[in-house]
Image (spheres, helix red, strand yellow):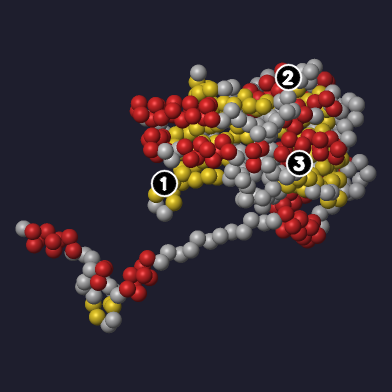
Amino acid sequence: MFKNTRKNTTAGRAPKKLVAGRFHASSRKAAPESQARQEQVKPAPIKTRIASFEDLKQQLDAWATNERIPGKIQAWFTRDAISEHSDWRIMNKLVNGHETLVLDAPAKGMDVPKPVQGIFDQLHKEHLRTIKKALRQIWFRATGDGRFALLVQANVHGKNSGHEIKTLVEFIQHSYPQVISCHQIQCTPNHIFSPAAQLSMRVDLRNIFGSAFMPIAGTGLSMHVLDWSPKIKDAWIELPQRIRDAIHPAAGDKFFEFYCGPSFIAASLAQDFDQVDTLDCRETAMESSKMNSRNLAGGTLKFHRGHLEANFLEKFFSRKENEGRWTFYLNVPTEEPLNAEQIQALAASRPERILLQAGDLESAGKFIKRFRAEGYMLRKNIPLYLEPGTGKFDLLMLFVPDRAGVLGGFTAKNGKNRKVERPREQVFGKKQGDIPHFVQKK
Protein backbone atom coordinates (compact mmCIF):
# COMPACT_ATOMS: atom_id res chain seq x y z
CA MET A 1 0.00 0.00 0.00
CA PHE A 2 2.79 2.38 0.82
CA LYS A 3 4.50 1.71 -2.53
CA ASN A 4 1.36 2.59 -4.48
CA THR A 5 0.92 5.77 -2.52
CA ARG A 6 4.42 6.83 -3.35
CA LYS A 7 3.92 6.20 -7.05
CA ASN A 8 0.72 8.22 -7.13
CA THR A 9 2.33 11.21 -5.48
CA THR A 10 5.10 11.33 -8.07
CA ALA A 11 2.88 10.77 -11.08
CA GLY A 12 2.63 13.65 -13.50
CA ARG A 13 5.81 15.36 -12.32
CA ALA A 14 8.09 16.81 -14.92
CA PRO A 15 11.50 15.11 -15.06
CA LYS A 16 14.31 17.01 -13.41
CA LYS A 17 16.62 19.10 -15.55
CA LEU A 18 19.72 17.58 -17.08
CA VAL A 19 22.80 18.15 -14.98
CA ALA A 20 26.22 17.40 -16.51
CA GLY A 21 24.63 15.64 -19.51
CA ARG A 22 22.45 13.13 -17.62
CA PHE A 23 19.13 12.93 -15.80
CA HIS A 24 19.73 13.91 -12.21
CA ALA A 25 17.52 11.85 -9.95
CA SER A 26 19.08 12.75 -6.64
CA SER A 27 17.80 15.29 -4.12
CA ARG A 28 18.36 19.06 -4.43
CA LYS A 29 21.09 18.88 -1.81
CA ALA A 30 23.13 16.63 -4.09
CA ALA A 31 22.89 19.05 -7.03
CA PRO A 32 26.06 20.89 -8.00
CA GLU A 33 26.78 23.87 -5.79
CA SER A 34 26.68 26.28 -8.73
CA GLN A 35 23.09 25.28 -9.59
CA ALA A 36 21.95 25.60 -5.97
CA ARG A 37 23.49 29.04 -5.82
CA GLN A 38 21.70 30.09 -9.04
CA GLU A 39 18.36 28.91 -7.68
CA GLN A 40 18.83 31.02 -4.56
CA VAL A 41 19.76 34.19 -6.43
CA LYS A 42 16.88 36.67 -6.50
CA PRO A 43 16.67 39.70 -8.73
CA ALA A 44 17.81 42.83 -6.96
CA PRO A 45 15.03 45.34 -6.26
CA ILE A 46 14.96 48.32 -8.59
CA LYS A 47 15.92 51.46 -6.70
CA THR A 48 14.38 54.67 -7.91
CA ARG A 49 16.18 57.94 -7.35
CA ILE A 50 14.18 60.74 -5.76
CA ALA A 51 14.42 63.92 -7.81
CA SER A 52 16.38 66.68 -6.12
CA PHE A 53 15.26 70.29 -5.85
CA GLU A 54 17.53 71.21 -8.77
CA ASP A 55 16.07 68.35 -10.84
CA LEU A 56 12.57 69.69 -10.24
CA LYS A 57 13.59 73.20 -11.26
CA GLN A 58 14.99 71.84 -14.53
CA GLN A 59 11.83 69.81 -15.14
CA LEU A 60 9.66 72.90 -14.72
CA ASP A 61 11.84 75.06 -16.98
CA ALA A 62 11.91 72.38 -19.69
CA TRP A 63 8.13 71.91 -19.50
CA ALA A 64 7.46 75.65 -19.73
CA THR A 65 9.77 75.95 -22.74
CA ASN A 66 8.61 72.85 -24.62
CA GLU A 67 4.91 73.47 -24.02
CA ARG A 68 5.19 77.23 -24.57
CA ILE A 69 3.48 77.94 -21.27
CA PRO A 70 2.34 81.57 -20.94
CA GLY A 71 2.52 83.55 -17.74
CA LYS A 72 5.50 84.37 -15.59
CA ILE A 73 7.09 81.62 -13.49
CA GLN A 74 7.68 83.18 -10.11
CA ALA A 75 10.10 82.25 -7.35
CA TRP A 76 9.73 78.81 -5.81
CA PHE A 77 7.85 78.72 -2.53
CA THR A 78 9.21 76.29 0.06
CA ARG A 79 10.33 75.96 3.66
CA ASP A 80 12.77 73.65 5.42
CA ALA A 81 11.10 70.43 6.51
CA ILE A 82 11.26 69.76 10.26
CA SER A 83 10.77 66.13 11.27
CA GLU A 84 8.77 67.02 14.41
CA HIS A 85 6.37 69.02 12.21
CA SER A 86 5.68 66.10 9.87
CA ASP A 87 3.49 62.99 9.78
CA TRP A 88 5.17 59.64 10.46
CA ARG A 89 3.86 56.10 10.37
CA ILE A 90 4.75 52.78 11.99
CA MET A 91 3.52 50.08 9.62
CA ASN A 92 3.39 46.31 9.41
CA LYS A 93 4.87 45.30 6.06
CA LEU A 94 5.95 42.06 4.42
CA VAL A 95 9.75 41.95 4.28
CA ASN A 96 11.29 38.77 2.81
CA GLY A 97 8.03 36.94 3.42
CA HIS A 98 7.69 37.99 7.06
CA GLU A 99 5.59 40.73 8.62
CA THR A 100 7.89 43.36 10.10
CA LEU A 101 7.33 46.72 11.71
CA VAL A 102 8.90 49.51 9.67
CA LEU A 103 9.10 53.28 9.97
CA ASP A 104 7.51 55.19 7.11
CA ALA A 105 9.19 58.61 6.93
CA PRO A 106 7.52 61.63 5.28
CA ALA A 107 10.70 62.23 3.25
CA LYS A 108 14.07 60.59 2.79
CA GLY A 109 16.85 61.42 5.22
CA MET A 110 14.74 62.92 8.01
CA ASP A 111 15.69 62.31 11.64
CA VAL A 112 13.15 60.24 13.54
CA PRO A 113 11.38 62.24 16.29
CA LYS A 114 11.82 60.89 19.82
CA PRO A 115 8.15 59.92 20.34
CA VAL A 116 8.11 57.96 17.07
CA GLN A 117 11.35 56.11 17.80
CA GLY A 118 10.40 55.44 21.41
CA ILE A 119 7.01 53.93 20.55
CA PHE A 120 8.58 51.94 17.70
CA ASP A 121 11.11 50.43 20.13
CA GLN A 122 8.44 49.74 22.74
CA LEU A 123 6.37 47.71 20.25
CA HIS A 124 9.24 45.23 19.98
CA LYS A 125 8.97 44.35 23.68
CA GLU A 126 7.82 40.82 24.49
CA HIS A 127 4.80 41.92 26.54
CA LEU A 128 3.34 43.65 23.44
CA ARG A 129 3.82 40.76 21.02
CA THR A 130 0.06 40.31 20.40
CA ILE A 131 -0.61 43.93 19.49
CA LYS A 132 2.55 43.97 17.38
CA LYS A 133 1.14 41.17 15.21
CA ALA A 134 -2.34 42.74 15.06
CA LEU A 135 -1.07 46.22 14.21
CA ARG A 136 -1.57 47.57 10.72
CA GLN A 137 -0.30 51.09 11.31
CA ILE A 138 0.15 53.89 13.82
CA TRP A 139 -0.18 57.27 12.13
CA PHE A 140 1.51 60.16 13.92
CA ARG A 141 -0.46 63.18 12.72
CA ALA A 142 1.68 66.26 13.28
CA THR A 143 0.14 69.52 14.45
CA GLY A 144 3.02 71.53 12.99
CA ASP A 145 4.49 72.69 16.31
CA GLY A 146 6.07 69.51 17.68
CA ARG A 147 2.94 67.73 18.93
CA PHE A 148 1.19 64.65 17.55
CA ALA A 149 -2.23 63.01 17.44
CA LEU A 150 -2.08 59.22 17.09
CA LEU A 151 -4.29 57.01 14.93
CA VAL A 152 -3.94 53.32 15.78
CA GLN A 153 -5.27 50.87 13.18
CA ALA A 154 -5.14 47.25 14.35
CA ASN A 155 -7.11 44.04 13.97
CA VAL A 156 -7.75 43.73 17.70
CA HIS A 157 -9.56 40.64 19.01
CA GLY A 158 -9.65 39.14 22.46
CA LYS A 159 -8.84 40.18 25.98
CA ASN A 160 -5.05 40.05 25.54
CA SER A 161 -5.04 42.56 22.69
CA GLY A 162 -7.20 44.99 24.64
CA HIS A 163 -4.92 44.71 27.66
CA GLU A 164 -1.82 45.33 25.54
CA ILE A 165 -3.33 48.41 23.92
CA LYS A 166 -4.07 49.77 27.38
CA THR A 167 -0.47 49.06 28.42
CA LEU A 168 0.88 50.81 25.31
CA VAL A 169 -1.35 53.84 25.83
CA GLU A 170 -0.21 54.16 29.45
CA PHE A 171 3.40 54.09 28.27
CA ILE A 172 2.72 56.82 25.70
CA GLN A 173 0.93 59.09 28.17
CA HIS A 174 3.66 58.66 30.77
CA SER A 175 6.65 59.03 28.43
CA TYR A 176 5.64 61.47 25.69
CA PRO A 177 3.59 64.58 26.55
CA GLN A 178 4.03 65.63 22.92
CA VAL A 179 1.27 63.12 22.08
CA ILE A 180 -1.89 65.10 22.77
CA SER A 181 -4.46 62.50 21.69
CA CYS A 182 -4.82 58.88 20.66
CA HIS A 183 -7.60 57.19 18.71
CA GLN A 184 -8.30 53.68 17.48
CA ILE A 185 -9.67 53.41 13.94
CA GLN A 186 -11.17 50.61 11.89
CA CYS A 187 -12.03 50.80 8.19
CA THR A 188 -14.77 49.00 6.31
CA PRO A 189 -13.74 47.57 3.87
CA ASN A 190 -10.53 46.71 5.70
CA HIS A 191 -8.15 49.02 3.82
CA ILE A 192 -5.16 50.89 5.17
CA PHE A 193 -6.47 54.28 6.23
CA SER A 194 -5.15 57.43 4.60
CA PRO A 195 -6.64 60.94 4.86
CA ALA A 196 -5.85 61.45 1.18
CA ALA A 197 -7.53 58.23 0.02
CA GLN A 198 -10.54 58.75 -2.23
CA LEU A 199 -11.99 55.32 -1.46
CA SER A 200 -15.54 55.20 -0.25
CA MET A 201 -15.16 53.65 3.16
CA ARG A 202 -16.62 53.71 6.60
CA VAL A 203 -14.18 54.76 9.33
CA ASP A 204 -15.01 53.95 12.94
CA LEU A 205 -13.15 56.22 15.34
CA ARG A 206 -12.89 55.31 19.02
CA ASN A 207 -11.36 57.91 21.27
CA ILE A 208 -8.76 56.61 23.73
CA PHE A 209 -7.64 59.96 25.14
CA GLY A 210 -7.57 63.58 24.02
CA SER A 211 -9.75 65.48 21.56
CA ALA A 212 -10.84 64.44 18.07
CA PHE A 213 -9.63 67.87 16.88
CA MET A 214 -5.98 68.81 16.64
CA PRO A 215 -4.56 72.36 16.44
CA ILE A 216 -2.81 73.57 13.30
CA ALA A 217 0.43 74.89 14.82
CA GLY A 218 -0.10 78.31 16.40
CA THR A 219 -2.63 79.58 13.86
CA GLY A 220 -5.62 79.36 16.19
CA LEU A 221 -7.26 76.97 13.70
CA SER A 222 -7.99 73.26 14.08
CA MET A 223 -8.72 70.15 12.04
CA HIS A 224 -10.30 66.77 12.65
CA VAL A 225 -7.76 63.98 13.16
CA LEU A 226 -9.15 62.13 10.11
CA ASP A 227 -9.10 65.17 7.82
CA TRP A 228 -6.57 65.82 5.06
CA SER A 229 -3.38 67.85 5.34
CA PRO A 230 0.05 67.37 3.73
CA LYS A 231 2.46 65.15 5.64
CA ILE A 232 5.03 67.95 5.96
CA LYS A 233 3.41 70.99 7.52
CA ASP A 234 6.01 73.81 7.50
CA ALA A 235 5.42 75.27 4.03
CA TRP A 236 1.68 74.52 4.06
CA ILE A 237 1.18 76.57 7.22
CA GLU A 238 2.70 79.62 5.49
CA LEU A 239 0.92 79.06 2.15
CA PRO A 240 -1.99 81.47 2.91
CA GLN A 241 0.49 84.35 3.22
CA ARG A 242 2.02 83.43 -0.17
CA ILE A 243 -1.45 83.41 -1.73
CA ARG A 244 -2.23 86.79 -0.17
CA ASP A 245 0.97 88.23 -1.67
CA ALA A 246 0.10 86.81 -5.09
CA ILE A 247 -3.43 88.20 -5.43
CA HIS A 248 -3.43 91.39 -3.29
CA PRO A 249 -7.12 91.21 -2.22
CA ALA A 250 -9.01 94.49 -2.21
CA ALA A 251 -11.93 95.71 -0.11
CA GLY A 252 -15.14 93.96 -1.09
CA ASP A 253 -13.45 90.85 -2.52
CA LYS A 254 -14.86 87.39 -1.76
CA PHE A 255 -13.14 84.00 -1.52
CA PHE A 256 -14.30 80.46 -2.32
CA GLU A 257 -12.18 77.37 -1.56
CA PHE A 258 -13.12 74.10 -3.28
CA TYR A 259 -11.89 70.66 -2.10
CA CYS A 260 -11.26 72.53 1.13
CA GLY A 261 -10.51 69.81 3.70
CA PRO A 262 -10.27 71.67 7.03
CA SER A 263 -10.79 75.02 5.22
CA PHE A 264 -7.36 76.09 6.45
CA ILE A 265 -6.54 78.33 3.48
CA ALA A 266 -9.94 80.06 3.48
CA ALA A 267 -10.03 80.50 7.26
CA SER A 268 -6.50 81.94 7.26
CA LEU A 269 -7.50 84.51 4.62
CA ALA A 270 -10.93 85.32 6.08
CA GLN A 271 -9.81 88.69 7.47
CA ASP A 272 -8.87 89.83 3.94
CA PHE A 273 -12.25 89.12 2.34
CA ASP A 274 -15.81 90.25 2.95
CA GLN A 275 -17.20 86.75 2.42
CA VAL A 276 -15.55 83.32 2.58
CA ASP A 277 -17.17 80.04 1.48
CA THR A 278 -15.79 76.50 1.24
CA LEU A 279 -16.96 73.24 -0.37
CA ASP A 280 -16.10 69.58 0.29
CA CYS A 281 -17.99 66.28 0.28
CA ARG A 282 -16.44 64.69 3.37
CA GLU A 283 -17.92 64.72 6.84
CA THR A 284 -14.51 65.30 8.44
CA ALA A 285 -14.11 68.45 6.32
CA MET A 286 -17.48 69.64 7.55
CA GLU A 287 -16.51 69.04 11.19
CA SER A 288 -13.18 70.85 10.79
CA SER A 289 -14.68 73.78 8.90
CA LYS A 290 -17.49 74.30 11.41
CA MET A 291 -14.96 74.31 14.22
CA ASN A 292 -12.84 76.94 12.44
CA SER A 293 -15.88 79.02 11.55
CA ARG A 294 -16.83 79.24 15.22
CA ASN A 295 -13.32 80.39 16.10
CA LEU A 296 -13.28 83.19 13.50
CA ALA A 297 -14.34 86.66 14.53
CA GLY A 298 -17.49 87.72 12.70
CA GLY A 299 -18.35 84.21 11.48
CA THR A 300 -17.48 85.03 7.86
CA LEU A 301 -16.71 81.40 6.91
CA LYS A 302 -19.55 79.27 5.56
CA PHE A 303 -19.13 75.60 4.66
CA HIS A 304 -21.12 73.76 1.98
CA ARG A 305 -21.12 69.97 1.89
CA GLY A 306 -21.27 68.42 -1.55
CA HIS A 307 -19.42 67.91 -4.81
CA LEU A 308 -18.25 70.54 -7.28
CA GLU A 309 -21.11 70.54 -9.79
CA ALA A 310 -22.72 72.98 -12.19
CA ASN A 311 -26.06 72.89 -10.35
CA PHE A 312 -24.50 74.07 -7.12
CA LEU A 313 -22.54 76.88 -8.78
CA GLU A 314 -25.55 78.12 -10.75
CA LYS A 315 -27.78 78.28 -7.71
CA PHE A 316 -25.13 79.81 -5.45
CA PHE A 317 -24.16 82.63 -7.82
CA SER A 318 -27.75 83.37 -8.85
CA ARG A 319 -28.38 84.77 -5.37
CA LYS A 320 -28.06 88.51 -5.09
CA GLU A 321 -26.06 88.34 -1.85
CA ASN A 322 -23.39 86.29 -3.64
CA GLU A 323 -22.68 88.83 -6.35
CA GLY A 324 -19.26 90.45 -6.30
CA ARG A 325 -15.57 89.96 -7.12
CA TRP A 326 -14.74 86.35 -6.30
CA THR A 327 -11.43 84.54 -6.01
CA PHE A 328 -11.66 80.77 -6.50
CA TYR A 329 -9.02 78.49 -4.98
CA LEU A 330 -8.87 74.81 -5.95
CA ASN A 331 -6.33 72.28 -4.70
CA VAL A 332 -7.35 69.56 -7.15
CA PRO A 333 -6.88 65.95 -5.90
CA THR A 334 -4.76 63.84 -8.22
CA GLU A 335 -7.42 61.13 -8.23
CA GLU A 336 -10.22 63.58 -9.16
CA PRO A 337 -9.07 65.83 -12.01
CA LEU A 338 -11.46 68.54 -13.12
CA ASN A 339 -13.58 67.53 -16.07
CA ALA A 340 -14.77 69.78 -18.90
CA GLU A 341 -18.21 70.34 -17.36
CA GLN A 342 -16.72 71.50 -14.05
CA ILE A 343 -14.31 73.89 -15.77
CA GLN A 344 -17.12 75.37 -17.85
CA ALA A 345 -19.25 75.86 -14.74
CA LEU A 346 -16.39 77.54 -12.86
CA ALA A 347 -15.67 79.90 -15.75
CA ALA A 348 -19.38 80.63 -16.24
CA SER A 349 -19.48 81.93 -12.65
CA ARG A 350 -17.15 84.73 -13.85
CA PRO A 351 -14.77 84.95 -10.88
CA GLU A 352 -12.22 87.75 -10.76
CA ARG A 353 -9.41 85.23 -10.21
CA ILE A 354 -8.98 81.45 -10.29
CA LEU A 355 -6.15 79.94 -8.26
CA LEU A 356 -5.66 76.36 -9.37
CA GLN A 357 -3.14 74.08 -7.63
CA ALA A 358 -2.09 71.08 -9.74
CA GLY A 359 -0.02 68.16 -8.51
CA ASP A 360 1.64 67.28 -11.84
CA LEU A 361 2.69 69.13 -14.98
CA GLU A 362 0.60 67.01 -17.35
CA SER A 363 -2.59 68.01 -15.56
CA ALA A 364 -1.41 71.62 -15.34
CA GLY A 365 -1.00 71.76 -19.12
CA LYS A 366 -4.53 70.43 -19.66
CA PHE A 367 -6.01 72.95 -17.21
CA ILE A 368 -4.27 75.84 -18.99
CA LYS A 369 -5.76 74.85 -22.35
CA ARG A 370 -9.25 74.27 -20.97
CA PHE A 371 -9.46 77.55 -19.07
CA ARG A 372 -8.06 79.35 -22.09
CA ALA A 373 -10.95 77.94 -24.10
CA GLU A 374 -13.32 79.42 -21.48
CA GLY A 375 -11.84 82.92 -21.73
CA TYR A 376 -9.34 82.80 -18.85
CA MET A 377 -5.69 83.56 -19.41
CA LEU A 378 -2.76 82.40 -17.28
CA ARG A 379 -1.19 85.31 -15.42
CA LYS A 380 1.22 83.69 -12.93
CA ASN A 381 2.83 80.32 -12.21
CA ILE A 382 4.00 79.75 -8.63
CA PRO A 383 5.88 76.46 -8.06
CA LEU A 384 5.19 75.07 -4.58
CA TYR A 385 7.76 72.74 -3.02
CA LEU A 386 5.55 71.97 -0.04
CA GLU A 387 7.14 68.63 0.93
CA PRO A 388 10.92 68.85 0.44
CA GLY A 389 12.70 65.56 -0.08
CA THR A 390 9.75 63.75 -1.66
CA GLY A 391 10.65 64.53 -5.27
CA LYS A 392 7.22 66.12 -5.86
CA PHE A 393 5.98 69.66 -6.25
CA ASP A 394 2.74 71.48 -7.03
CA LEU A 395 2.13 74.32 -9.46
CA LEU A 396 -0.19 77.13 -8.34
CA MET A 397 -1.61 78.88 -11.40
CA LEU A 398 -3.39 82.24 -11.37
CA PHE A 399 -6.01 82.71 -14.11
CA VAL A 400 -7.77 86.00 -14.84
CA PRO A 401 -10.51 86.93 -17.34
CA ASP A 402 -9.30 87.98 -20.78
CA ARG A 403 -10.93 91.39 -20.90
CA ALA A 404 -8.52 92.73 -23.52
CA GLY A 405 -9.36 90.05 -26.06
CA VAL A 406 -5.87 88.55 -26.13
CA LEU A 407 -7.36 85.07 -26.53
CA GLY A 408 -9.42 86.03 -29.58
CA GLY A 409 -13.05 84.99 -29.74
CA PHE A 410 -13.10 83.07 -26.44
CA THR A 411 -13.84 86.14 -24.32
CA ALA A 412 -16.80 87.23 -26.41
CA LYS A 413 -18.25 83.75 -26.27
CA ASN A 414 -17.99 83.45 -22.50
CA GLY A 415 -18.49 87.05 -21.45
CA LYS A 416 -22.23 87.08 -22.05
CA ASN A 417 -24.65 87.47 -19.20
CA ARG A 418 -25.94 84.10 -18.15
CA LYS A 419 -29.63 83.46 -17.85
CA VAL A 420 -29.81 81.50 -14.60
CA GLU A 421 -32.92 79.61 -13.56
CA ARG A 422 -33.18 79.26 -9.81
CA PRO A 423 -33.38 75.49 -9.20
CA ARG A 424 -35.50 74.05 -6.45
CA GLU A 425 -33.90 73.32 -3.11
CA GLN A 426 -32.00 70.08 -3.13
CA VAL A 427 -29.02 68.28 -1.65
CA PHE A 428 -26.12 68.91 -3.99
CA GLY A 429 -23.67 66.28 -5.10
CA LYS A 430 -23.87 62.58 -5.51
CA LYS A 431 -26.05 60.19 -3.60
CA GLN A 432 -25.49 60.29 0.13
CA GLY A 433 -24.21 56.71 0.07
CA ASP A 434 -21.35 57.71 -2.24
CA ILE A 435 -19.99 60.27 0.23
CA PRO A 436 -17.26 58.88 2.54
CA HIS A 437 -18.20 59.23 6.20
CA PHE A 438 -16.98 58.24 9.59
CA VAL A 439 -18.59 57.13 12.81
CA GLN A 440 -17.21 58.35 16.10
CA LYS A 441 -17.59 56.14 19.13
CA LYS A 442 -17.30 57.36 22.69
Relative placement, left or right, of 374 versus 119 is right
| Image position, residue 252 (x, y; %) | 89, 25
Residue at (38, 38) in percent of width and height: 126
Q: Residue 320, labelled with which disc? A: none
Of all residues, the one furthest to the right in this rendering is 404
Q: Amino acid at mark 2?
A: Asn
**Foreground residue, 429 or 384?**
384
| Image position, residue 218 (x, y; %) | 73, 28
Residue that carries the numbered disc 1 in the rendered image = 99
Taking the image as drawn, is residue 190 in sight? no
The crowd level at tag 3 (other Cα within 10 Å; few <14, some 14-19, many 20+) is many
Which quadrant of the rendered structure holds the N terminus? Answer: bottom left
The crowd level at tag 2 (other Cα within 10 Å; few <14, some 14-19, many 20+) is some
Label 3 vs label 2, nearer the camera: 2
Decide: is 262 above or below 108.
Answer: above
Q: Amino acid at mark 3?
A: Leu
Quadrant assignment, res 276? top right
Decide: is 294 above or below 145.
Answer: above
Q: Residue 356, labelled with which disc? A: 3
Residue at (50, 20) in percent of width and height: 441
**Foreground residue, 93 or 395?**
93
Q: Which of pointers 3 and 1 lies earlier in the amino acid sequence? A: 1
Residue that carries the numbered disc 2 in the rendered image = 295
